[in-house]
Amino acid sequence: MRRPCAPHWRRVSAQCYSDVALATDALRVLRQQQVAVRSALTETQDRFRLRQVGDRTTLDLLNAENDAASAELTLLQARIEWLMNRLRLAALAGRLDEAWLQSVNASLQAPVGR
């Protein structure tokens, strides 16, 4: 017997799958961006230690630290979005159980990109 709302569930599950795929790609790009920003921060910190003169050097360091913090926040937000989409997809597929939730919880405890 066919459920009356089956087309709706197919559309929702396809959208969730698409959201997971997009979030996975976004995470990959954001991790690369985070590596580049951290490298720039390290370079700026090194220059700051060598010179330690002037407002410009201090401003460069503060800007680099701000960029690094912003990249970290963006990566964390994307990771949460990715996990939420995976949870939605698992729920739609009927595979959301305690073991799955524990694995998601464990992945939240792991450090990101450090």
Image: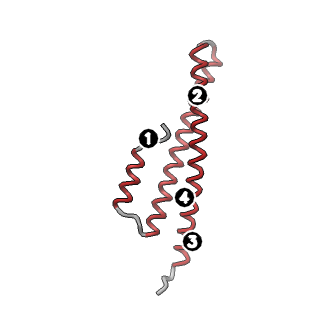
- Gap between marks 3 and 2, in whole Å? 44 Å
Residue that mark 4 sits on: 20
Residue that mark 1 sits on: 111
Q: Can you tell which mark lies on residue 69?
A: none
User: On screen, 4 above or below 114?
Assistant: below
User: On screen, 22 above or below 45?
Assistant: below
- Gap between marks 2 and 4, in whole Å? 31 Å
- Is the C-beta separation of discs 2 and 1 under 8 Å? no
Mark earlier in primary sequence (3, 2): 3
Q: Quadrant of residue 68?
A: top right
Mark earlier in primary sequence (2, 4): 4
- Is the C-beta separation of discs 1 and 4 under 8 Å? no
Residue that appears at 54% across and 58% down: 20
Check disc 4 and give the amino acid type.
Val
| Secondary element at tag 1 | loop
| Secondary element at tag 2 | helix
Mark earlier in primary sequence (3, 1): 3
Check disc 2 and give the amino acid type.
Leu
Q: Quadrant of residue 74?
A: top right
x%, y% of residue 76? 50, 44
